[in-house]
């Protein structure tokens, strides 16, 4: 159970007005109007929020089904992703910063103080950093793409980028080659990312759905993550409420907790 909590936190971690957002409607993509330049301009747009609080529920399947966990996520853009998980009672808390992250769970009284090597190990990739995690949580591409590496097609009213070859992602010793497929809706919102490294027999798929307009910020309400290597894991994040509010993000590892390292 301890490892499941860590996986869940590592992946799901980020005047006040509260809203569920207004559903963003799609339109038909006309072949003659397909605009690759506009697509890549949208891909490279930076996040537009300064702070964002999200109420969410999370479900995980990793050999067994586990109860839904209530999450409070707080994203302070470029500075911190704070997460608090509960199941009737508080379960765990995490604080992720550009330098790495810390988290602890109350059932086993253990904690992790790590860099992003740990998250990369969980996702079976080698390129995740703070900005990648922030992007993943708000429906933005979490790795760089270049037009010359992909072929653009329109399929089922979606813009679909398919890599022409395996693409090196990461840097230095952390570079790996992935075949990738990336799909966007008619408004250039990210719908799906598929990354496959056949050499290392790893597969990562992230799906986004039900985009809403919250205070001129376009955000997904549903995120599904599928990871496959020797074993499979599925994680679903359902965002129930968004707020733009500054909040306190307390984080102190309780005394008596044991540091845990997971390979």
Image (cartoon, rainbow, N blue to C red):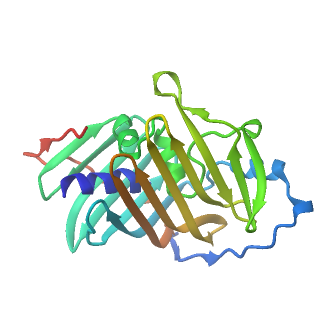
Q: Residue at x 44, y 57 (%)?
A: 226
Q: Residue at x 82, y 67 (%)?
A: 29
Residue with the most extreme right position: 32
* Image location of residue 131, percent across then percent down: 52, 43
Q: Which sits in the foreground, 250 or 84?
A: 84
Quadrant where the C terminus lies?
Answer: top left
Residue 147, placed above or below residue 27: above
In the image: residue 231, left or right of residue 124: left
In the image: residue 96, left or right of residue 51: left
Q: Which sits in the foreground, 119 or 213?
A: 119
In the image: residue 114, left or right of residue 127: left
* Image location of residue 34, percent across then percent down: 85, 58
Q: Residue at x 56, y 64 (%)?
A: 208
Q: Residue at x 41, y 46 (%)?
A: 123
* Image location of residue 42, percent across then percent down: 73, 52
Quadrant where the N terminus lies?
Answer: bottom left
* Image location of residue 178, percent across then percent down: 56, 38
Residue 13 visible in rendering: no
Residue 241, placed above or below residue 98: below
């Amino acid at each position: 159970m301890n490892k499941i909590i860590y996986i869940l936190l590592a992946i799901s971690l980020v005047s006040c007005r509260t809203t569920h957002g207004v559903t963003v409607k799609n339109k038909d993509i006309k072949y003659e109007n397909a605009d690759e330049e506009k697509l890549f301009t949208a891909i490279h747009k930076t996040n537009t929020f300064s702070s964002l609080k999200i109420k969410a529920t999370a479900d995980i399947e990793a050999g067994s089904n586990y109860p839904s966990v209530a999450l409070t996520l707080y994203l302070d853009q470029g500075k911190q992703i704070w997460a608090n998980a509960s199941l009737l009672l508080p379960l765990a808390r995490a604080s992720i910063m550009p330098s790495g992250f810390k988290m602890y769970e109350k059932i086993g009284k253990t904690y992790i103080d790590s860099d992003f090597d740990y998250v990369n190990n969980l996702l079976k990739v080698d390129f995740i950093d703070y900005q990648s995690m922030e992007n993943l949580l708000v429906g933005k591409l979490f790795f760089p793409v270049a037009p010359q590496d992909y072929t653009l097609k329109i399929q089922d009213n979606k813009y679909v980028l398919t890599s022409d070859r395996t693409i090196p992602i990461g840097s230095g010793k952390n570079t790996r080659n992935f075949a990738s497929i990336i799909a966007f809706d008619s408004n250039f919102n990210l719908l799906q990312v598929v990354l496959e490294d056949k050499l290392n027999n790893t597969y990562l798929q992230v799906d986004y759905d039900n985009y809403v307009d919250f205070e001129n910020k376009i955000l997904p309400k549903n995120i599904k993550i599928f990871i496959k290597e020797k074993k499979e894991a599925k994680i679903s994040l359902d965002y129930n409420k968004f707020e733009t509010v500054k909040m306190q993000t307390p984080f102190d590892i309780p005394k008596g907790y044991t540091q845990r390292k997971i390979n």
